[in-house]
Image (cartoon, rainbow, N blue to C red):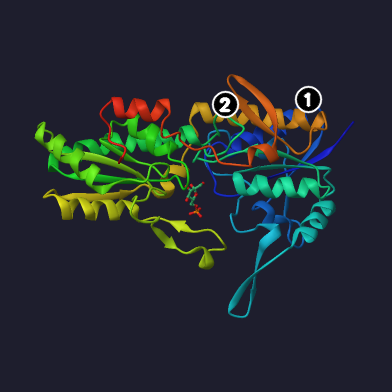
Amino acid sequence: MSKTIAILTGGGDCPGLNAVIRGVVRAATLQRGWRVLGIEDGFDGLVGEPRLRELDLEAVRGILPRGGTILGTSNRGNPFAYPVRQGEEVRLVDMSEQVIEGFRRTGAEVLIAVGGDGTLKIGQRLNELGLPVVGVPKTIDNDLRGTDVTFGYHTAVATVTEALDKLHSTAESHHRAMVVEVMGRDAGWIALEAGIAGSADVILLPEIPFQMEKVVEALVRRRERGSRFSIIVVAEGAFPAAGGRVVQVGAEENYGIERLGGVGRFVANEIEKRMAVETRTVVLGHVQRGGSPSHTDRLLGSRFGVKAVDLIEQGQFGQMVALRGRAIIAVSIEEAVGSLNLVDPDGELAHTAEALGIMLGR
Ligand code: F6P
């Protein structure tokens, strides 16, 4: 039976979103003859008059290698706490009814919500309120449970690894300590995996509060062994055991979410203070979210897109597509967003790093 389905991308963008959109459109139109509508800018596109785009084969032609999302995204538009300006003040208002009404006006029967923890939680709540939702997990941080990995992560790790390779030669030439701040609010996957792959000397993660004296000891030991430069990778959410996270903009001024950043500079200052070594800080920032998706992320995004359409056909709403081992499966969104997928400080990966001589700040 013919159907109309809608798709939106929410939260921070990442490489591979276009592969999902293309996968959905091709599986829905080529195999089933369904109609696909794209909602622009995440849930924002359902507030007021729906902002829609017809997604036919022509609309998704050539987008597989493109970074970002052709639909646009937003990490502000939570329908359950929607920022509304009233004079000088921004108030958070429950707009979920308007969003459900906006969705009804699109004429679509089901919504595919592609996003991270925030977007999927919203999708889950809307599903409970009667709007059928299928979830697709995305985030470069790889902090979502329920799936072995999210798309976007592989490309981000490749970007950071390449940056670390490049920073090695300049750090070595100038005999400097190079502190590289990478993304990872709660989970240090990018820092740990790229740090190992890019041969870092120190890796600091949100999961292991760090002791500055241990970091300095490791750098001194390295110098004593004859290495006159060091590479220190710091996840933006890492924090000293004796203090808190370094926040750039507080949650109250940033729609309820802290904007992190600055821990790299903090670590660099401490190193310069505690030992005579010239230090530089590099913040890789949103470079990690950009660029063409790796083959792994194109493949995973495509498989997720196709599976999301299968789930709609089977009426499996409130479910999220996921990778488990080599298989693409369905898991309940509720289960997936219940807690975060964090690095195990006592797990194999942390052990491997330490066995390789990498200091994890403890
Ligand atoms: O996608 C998650 C993330 O990359 C976090 O690691 C980071 O804190 C956040 O996005 C930054 O998002 P933005 O600057 O787009 O608000």
Instruction: Name the spot of residue 304 as percent of width and height, x first.
Output: 65, 30
Q: Name the residue under label 2.
A: 299
- Total marks in image: 2
Furthest residue toward bottom: 87
Q: Residues within 10 Å of mark 1 (few under 14, many from 20)?
A: few
Q: Is residue 38 visible?
A: no
Instruction: Name the spot of residue 270 as percent of width and height, x first.
Output: 22, 54
Q: In which quarter of the image is the N terminus?
A: top right
**Nearer-the-camera pick, 48 or 221:** 221
- In the depicted structure, whether residue 88 falls above or below residue 277: below
Instruction: Name the spot of residue 278 as percent of width and height, x first.
Output: 15, 50
Q: In this view, does 194 lie to the left or right of 68?
A: left
Describe the element under mark 1 as helix, strand or loop: loop
**Nearer-the-camera pick, 343 or 249:** 343
Q: Of tags 2 and 1, which is closer to the observer?
A: 2
Q: Quadrant of the C terminus?
A: top left
Q: Residues within 10 Å of mark 2 (few under 14, many from 20)?
A: some
Amino acid found under the numbered disc labelled 1:
Gln
Identify the disc placed on residue 336: none
Q: Mark 1 points at which residue?
A: 31
